[in-house]
Amino acid sequence: MRRALLLVVPFLFTSATVHAAQSTGNAALALAALIGAEDPVLSQSQKHVLAHFLAGQAVSVPPTSQRIKTRADRIRCRMGDVDTTLHDCTLTFGHREITRAGRTGQLLLATLQENGVPPDGAAGTIYYTVTNISCVVDATGVEQHAGIGATCTFTNGE
């Protein structure tokens, strides 16, 4: 028993606040649409559908029976609590990194907050980081206006 405790105790102090999370409904749809706009794997048609959904246009958006899957390896946003003009996010898709600053960065950062991503602050900067983000949007479900049709899973932290 004592040996088991000696093995476990160091892990208690070194474990990070990394945990799996899931969102659904409006928050997930917004996150999926923002990731999808940058996802190099999605077609222009799929990006168009997601953009329409984010704009509140969910009626008769083709292709209505399609499930759109979008994913990113990592999203890391930061905002300043000293420099209040600082808002930016970097999305990582494999080896490709895309940084969005200003209004677009703030929009993505606020969407991560809406999806329950906890902050991690350091020296005047607050970070929001998620990894292994995967979202599925079922166009038929979204068009029902019943709070269904979008799900995202991700890991909070790095």
Image (tube, rainbow, N blue to C red):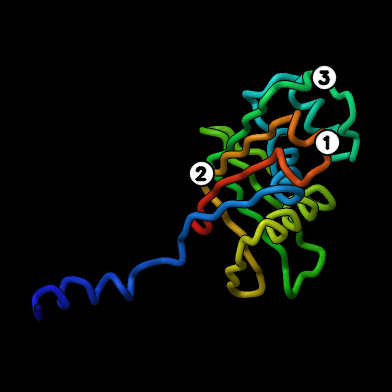
What type is the residue that disc 2 sits on? Asn
Sequence-earlier tag: 3 or 1: 1
Where's the N terminus, which quadrant? Answer: bottom left
Q: Mark 3 or mark 2, which has the lower sequence index?
A: 3
- Type of amino acid under label 3: Pro
**First of labels 2, 1 by sequence position:** 1
The number of callouts visible is 3
Distance in Å between CA atoms under marks 3 and 1: 11 Å
The residue lying toward the viewer, choosing from 68 and 42, is 68
Amino acid at pointer 1: Phe
Residue positioned 73% across, 21% down in the render: 65
- For disc 2, the neighbor class at 10 Å (few under 14, some 14 to 19, many from 20) is some
Residue on which disc 1 sits: 53
- Residue at coordinates 58% horizontally, 72% vertically from top-left? 122
> What SS does tag 1 mark?
helix
The mark found on residue 62 in the picture is 3
> Where on the picture, by quarter, is residue 148?
top right
What is the CA distance from the residue labelled 2 to the residue labelled 1?
A: 23 Å
- Is 139 displayed left or right of 127 in the figure? right
* Residue 156 x/y as whole percent: 53, 57
Q: Which residue is mark 2?
A: 132
Residue 143: percent from left, percent from top: 82, 33
